[in-house]
Image (cartoon, rainbow, N blue to C red):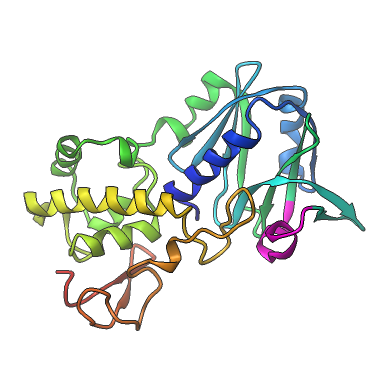
Amino acid sequence: MPELPEVQTIVDELKKTVKNRRIVDLWTDWSKYRPIRHHVVGKKIIDIERRGKNILFSLSDNHLLLIHQKMSGHLLVGKWKSVKGIWVSTIPGPLLEDRNNQYIRLIFFLDNGKMLALSDLRRFAKILCGPKNIILNLPDIKDLGPEALSLSEKVFIELFKKKKGILKSVLMNQNFIAGIGNIYSDEIVWLAKIHPQKRIEKLTLKNLKDVYQAMREIVLKAHKLNGTSIDDYRTANGERGRYDLVRYVYQREGKLCQRCGTLIKRIKIGGRSAHFCPKCQV
């Protein structure tokens, strides 16, 4: 699932390409998306922001369009034509050639001839639209914790001092800190040299400072590299992110730790995989 670096990468690109454009029509092949049509057609995209893993489009009538891309969804900007009922990119390159960009489920037609499309193999993406005050008060938004990069070290430490639980699970709790998921929680605790199963109550002040610094370093580095494209995620141009080329432990089970040379292991924590070095993460 796209996390903070991936979602922010897409938001950055959308601000350059679709901000201030008007939505003139909408196509979808799925009934659950059709009700949003009367909310968005004819509306101008005033701004695009990220909250946690959600993308929020501010529309010209004080409505918000919320898109959560979920497991396999990603937004793309380009031009497509329908060929025997299948949308095919008219722009050469990854939009046309990369299979992950070819599961078009929804298209917003824009006033400059471009299109904003959702490619989503598994059809899990969530899309909602309504008055701004209603969308912002939905649990999806209202219950989110502070943004990972908005926290000072002092506030971060105070938050953790009041929390109990397993480190990796707590980092992934969107109601505690927003934006971090399975990929970057693995990367953060590896860089901080802490076992992912370590309980928060047993972390020292140094541990907490190390986690904070690792969180900032990993998230900023991943954003700079446009995110991780091991699976379905692609940028709004249809291109792969590059963080997976430099990742430390995520999905590197059986490979050598880049710090000590020990084989990376994988365990399950709360139903999710955790990758770690058994020697230098204690």
Residue extending furthest toward the right: 84
- Residue that appears at 55% across and 51% down: 70
- How many numbered tags mark residues here? 0
Quarter of the image that includes the C terminus: bottom left
- Rendering coords of residue 71 (x, y %): 55, 56
Residue extending furthest toward the top: 61
Residue 222 falls within the magenta-colored stretch: no
Q: Is residue 110 above or below residue 271?
A: above
Q: Report the side of 213 relative to 239 (left or right).
A: left
Q: Report the side of 156 relative to 247 (left or right).
A: left
Q: Is residue 105 above or below residue 94?
A: above
Residue 93 falls within the magenta-colored stretch: yes
Q: Report the side of 16 relative to 27 (left or right).
A: left
Q: Is residue 251 above or below residue 178?
A: below
- Residue that appears at 38% across and 65% down: 271
| Magenta range | 91-104
- Rendering coords of residue 260 (x, y %): 20, 78
- Residue that appears at 30% across and 56% down: 169
- Rendering coords of residue 43 (x, y %): 72, 22
- Rendering coords of residue 278 (x, y %): 21, 77
- Residue that appears at 20% across and 40% down: 156
